[in-house]
Amino acid sequence: MSEVEIRRSTRRKRTVRAYREGDKTIVLVPAHLTRAQEAEHVRDLVARLDRRERRRAPSDDALVQRAHELSARWLGGRAVPTSVRWVTNQNSRWGSCTSVDGSIRLSHRLQGMPEDVVDYVLLHELAHLIEANHSKRFWALLSDFPHAERAKGFLEGVVWQQR
């Protein structure tokens, strides 16, 4: 569990708030709360933040499961990755695929992005297990995915914003 810093405030009257600042959890509480009330709020809010972060960053196992679901639905189950995992060393690509061994890597920068965007990148890499290049046949594999254009636009906007 990460470090929890509690900040009591006489100006704060009713609301209790928590957020993450790096590896630390900051909890803002009204000064009038008892220690027992404070402890209860801290426990509940930290648990809520943990759940939210798990939803934002599915585990590698969850990525593998999602890859199989996407392959079955959009690629007729033809793309079968041997591994799918998050990586922190991809800062210029959203994902990559090694078709020789069937491994797929997604950039950690996708974590927290809309599910359709992550699905698109994952589906894009899955399609590379069938077609290694960006040929017409490759793009035809992705043509039925309804969120492709919106996802590409979203990712282009992220890149543009980072300039």
Image (tube, grey):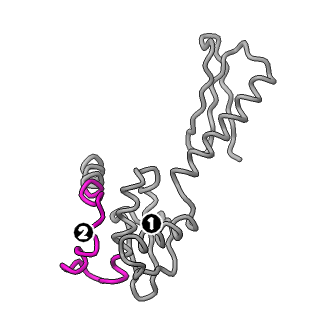
Residue at 63% x, 45% y is 50
Q: Where is residue 76 drawn, in percent x and y?
A: 38, 78
Residue furthest left as drawn: 136
Bin the neighbour count of mark 2 within 10 Å (Cα to Cα): few under 14, some 14-19, many 20 and up: few
Write down the residue under mark 2: 143
Q: Amino acid at mark 1?
A: Asn
In whole angstroms, how far apart are the C-alphas of marks 1 and 2? Answer: 29 Å
Q: In the figure, 51 relative to 80: above or below? A: above
Q: Tell me residue 64's x, y (percent).
A: 52, 70
Up-down: is 157 above or below 59?
Answer: above
**Image quarter for residue 117?**
bottom left
**Left or right side of 150 for 62:** right
Of the two numbered discs 1 and 2 in the rendering, the one whose residue sits closer to the viewer: 2
x, y percent for residue 20: 57, 39
Identify residue for label 1.
89
* Residue at figure coordinates x 64%, y 11% from the top left: 10
129 in the magenta segment:
yes
Along the polypeptide, which appears first: circle 1 or circle 2?
1
Q: Is 111 a magenta residue?
A: no
Q: Which residues are magenta?
A: 127-152
Residue at x-position 37% and y-position 82% = 129
Q: Residue 26: name its quadrant.
A: top right
Binning the other alpha carbons within 10 Å of mark 1 as few (below 14), some (14 to 19) or many (20 upward) gives few
- Work out which residue is located at the far right of the displayed protein and give it: 36
Dot 2 falls on a residue whose secondary structure is loop
Q: Amino acid at mark 2?
A: Ser
- In the picture shown, does residue 135 fall above or below 94? below
Residue 39: which disc?
none
Q: Is residue 93 left or right of residue 149?
A: right
